[in-house]
Image (cartoon, rainbow, N blue to C red):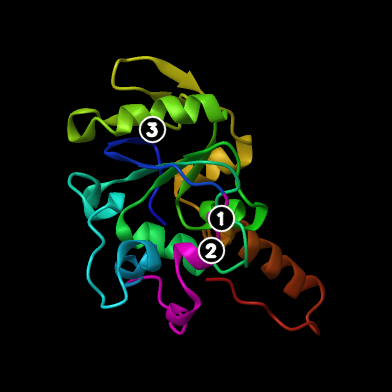
Amino acid sequence: MEAFTVLTGIAAPLPLANVDTDKIIPARFLKTIKRSGLGINLFDTLRYDEAGGERPDFVLNQEPYRRAQILIAHENFGCGSSREHAPWALLDFGIRCIIAPDFADIFYNNCFKNGILPVRLPRAVCDELMQDARLGGNARMTVDLQAEVVVRPNGERIPFELDAHRRHMLLEGLDEIGQTLARAASIEQFEAERQANLPWLPKIAVG
């Protein structure tokens, strides 16, 4: 998983509340178990019309937001079913950070497993950031996870809070499997000692 340290990029305003996972990636695209290739169908019903053509009024179909790495939304982002394909689709499109007043719990947890930083900020602050984002490519935003701040185009630094363990995992680019493998040497030492003391137990391989 790619580490998240400091991200400076284009932010796309999405002034919608209760954006559910079916809206993020419709169920008909969930047949794959691959994490790649889903970005083209991100927000499919919002981005495309019935004939498959782009809807020109949707933000991600407009320049410079086709290259957005930050998404700013309203309350309860990621509600609905627990599909992990939702963060997969966001990441495959290029979104590394989502800023909203709050998130659905399962979606929030899945973001960290996939290297996406969800930032909780008050609704009024999100609205201000959306105004910044509407300025386009000349108004890039910075999200600094080390310092736990969002830096507006005018230089104002907006602090946010994140659980220390989640912050560490993102900074190091670790998911649960990566965290386990980082301790492989200690696990193998434990298994070797266990095997010596209790040879009748099966040996467990790590890595």
Compared with 99, 189 (above or below) is below
> Which region shows up in magenta?
18-36
Label 1 and label 2: CA atoms lie apart by 5 Å
In this rendered view, identify the residue nearer to me: 152 or 54.
Answer: 54
Q: Which residue is mark 1?
A: 78
Residue 6 in magenta stretch? no
- Name the amino acid type tagged 2: Thr
Query: Under tag 2, what secondary structure?
Result: helix
Q: Find out whether the residues at labels 1 and 2 contact each other: C-beta distance under 8 Å.
A: yes
Q: Find out whether the residues at labels 2 and 3 contact each other: C-beta distance under 8 Å.
A: no
- Residue 55 in the image: state x and y as whole percent: 26, 61
- Main SS class of the magenta portion in the image: loop
Residue 143 visible here: no
In this rendered view, identify the residue nearer to me: 181 or 6.
Answer: 6
Q: Which residue is mark 3?
A: 130
- Name the amino acid type tagged 1: Gly
Question: Left of 87 or right of it: where is 47?
Answer: left
Counting residues from the start of the chain, the first of labels 3 and 1 encountered is: 1
Q: Which residue is mark 2?
A: 21
Of marks 3 and 1, the one in the foreground? 3
